Image: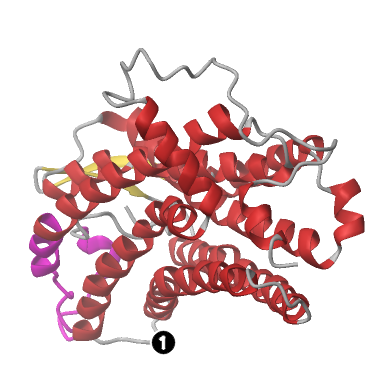
Amino acid sequence: MNVTGTTDPTLTDESIYSIYYHDDNFPEPCTKEGVKKFGGLFLPPLYTLVFLFGLLGNSMVVLVLFKYKRLRSMTDVYLLNLAISDLLFVLSLPFWAYYAADQWVFGLGLCKIISWIYLVGFYSGIFFIMLMSIDRYLAIVHVVFSLRARTVTHGVIISLATWSVAVFVSLPGLLFSTCSTERNHTYCKTKYSFNSTQWKVLSSLEINVLGLVIPLGIMLFCYSRIIRTLQHCKNEKKNKAVKMIFAVVVLFLGFWTPYNVVLFLETLVELEVLQDCTLERHLDYAIQATETLAFVHCCLNPVIYFFLGEKFRKYIIQLLKTCRGSFVLCKHCGLLQNYSPDAPSSSFTQSTMDHELHDAL
């Protein structure tokens, strides 16, 4: 399932990609059966791996935030919402994995709901990464102002507004997703009743602008100012903070930029700026590969916290020691116990990520 709604995991709907001519003098439609076979073999195992690692990693983030951090700062609220976004996103992947391997067998209702959940998780995840960049910028560059602005209450209000925006921009996935049967094969895809090309182009532009251009611009501004501020500090932990910032930006760029570039090229195909069947086939292969690469990003946030955040790593290890068995049925997890290793020394307590950055000051 492509987030633009122009393709599905199997990429077999020739009506989307092929140009149908009514005159025999025109070339034949561009067929892509090889893309279908490639997607059926390539996508299901990768979607399954992303689902398993994303579910495990982000579930551990949620447990740590509730059990140890107790959501005492704005950053904790954003971290929780980012983990929920990633969980929402990965929960749709088993459906797309089966769809890529076979066909859509889950009915019209789930076609609409899963498409919508997929998009909400996609947009909200990127939005919360952007908000966390702004949050760190305020915490490091505008310390005095951040003491008043970065409260749990403000974090909750901004998070609710962010979810509202994500739900709104994802509505086309709910409204226009539909099931159709062609050649005894059932598809779940986005189908516009009018101005199909214009809708597809607008959808692709929306993904590029809201999913890459605006978040990346904000992240680069915030982190460049943070690094400039940290350069004036002589704390030995400055390098660790800069490494975390570098990791967040590079991973976001590395995992999302290829996908957005391919989407932009597909937009040119929709506008008939690019008209070459071989190029279209290559783009279809590329979108499967780059989309899966982008999906992996939802598994990486817990990895970043674990390897670059000392306190977060300590909490994960503590959680694993406490819950030696199953995370679901473990009777000794003590999720309701009052465990507070970070007892606040004042009314304002920094979060895990804040500690890593503020230690550099």
- Element at badge 1? loop
Colour pattern = secondary structure
- The question of residue 33 being in magenta is answered with yes
Looking at this view, is 260 or 205 the one in front? 260
Q: Is residue 294 left or right of residue 52?
A: right
* Span colored in magenta: 13-40
Q: What count of labels does the image hold? A: 1
Q: Is residue 327 above or below residue 87?
A: above
Please indicate, yes or no, whether residue 26 appears anywhere in the rendered image: no
Residue 232 image point, x, y percent = 78, 81
Q: Is residue 37 above or below residue 111?
A: below
Q: Is residue 346 left or right of residue 202?
A: right
Looking at this view, is 37 or 138 the one in front? 138
**What residue sits right under mark 1 in the picture?**
273
Looking at this view, is 115 or 56 the one in front? 56
Q: Quadrant of residue 104?
A: top left
Please indicate, yes or no, whether residue 315 appears anywhere in the rendered image: yes
Q: Is residue 18 above or below residue 128?
A: below
- The question of residue 120 being in magenta is answered with no
**Mark 1 Cα-neighbour bin, 10 Å: few <14, some 14–19, many ≥20:** few
Q: Quadrant of residue 164?
A: top right
Q: Is residue 245 above or below residue 322?
A: below
Residue 197 image point, x, y percent = 44, 66
Residue 71 image point, x, y percent = 66, 34
Residue at left 81%, top 68%?
A: 141
Residue at left 44%, top 69%?
A: 256
Q: Is residue 166 left or right of residue 145?
A: left
Q: Amino acid at mark 1?
A: Val
Residue at left 54%, top 74%?
A: 246
Q: Is residue 179 left or right of residue 116?
A: left
